[in-house]
Image (cartoon, rainbow, N blue to C red):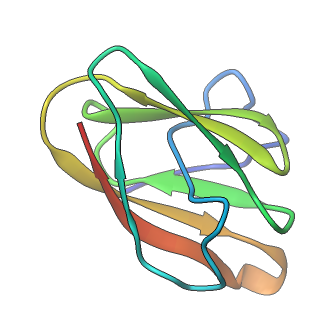
Amino acid sequence: MHLYNPFAAIALAVSLFVATAGPASAHEIRVALDQAFPIRLSETAEGVAIGNPTIAGVSVQNDRFLFVTGRSYGSTNLVVVGGNGRVLYSGRVTV
């Protein structure tokens, strides 16, 4: 798993989150190949991890707004962590 800090690696950061998701909830995000899916977070994110960055990528715009991009067909997982290491989102991304 690759871990990205949204403040230290905005250009490198990876893929997604569901704006309506509550803390530590699991949802599936579906994104088309070579398309972006916007995610507005309800809380400030401090870290973003994508299981397989060859399937989906995440672009961090700021600490509350992400884009998930489909890179190749398949599925992986996305985890967004907030303050004190609390999991804000954990779910599957399918391209």
Return the residue found at the far front.
20
Q: How far across and down, in percent of the image, does residue 7 sit?
A: 85, 42
Q: How far across and down, in percent of the image, does residue 2 sit?
A: 45, 50
Height in image: 34 above or below 10? above
Q: Within the image, what quadrant is residue 24 found in?
A: bottom right
Residue drawn at x 51%, y 83% as measured from the top left: 25
Return the residue found at the far top.
34
Height in image: 74 above or below 48? above
Using residue 78 as the reference point, say whether residue 54 is left or right of it. left
Using residue 30 as the reference point, say whether residue 57 is left or right of it. right
Front residue of 10/33: it is: 33
Front residue of 18/78: it is: 18
Using residue 26 as the reference point, say whether residue 42 is left or right of it. right
Q: Within the image, what quadrant is residue 80 found in?
A: bottom right
Height in image: 23 above or below 33? below
Front residue of 91/81: it is: 91
Return the residue found at the far left.
74
Q: How far across and down, in percent of the image, does residue 14 sit?
A: 53, 37
Q: How far across and down, in percent of the image, does residue 22 sit?
A: 65, 81
Which quadrant: the C terminus? top left
Height in image: 69 above or below 26? above
Residue drawn at x 69%, y 59% as measured from the top left: 47
Residue drawn at x 61%, y 35% as measured from the top left: 13
Residue drawn at x 51%, y 55% as measured from the top left: 49
Which quadrant: the N terminus? bottom left
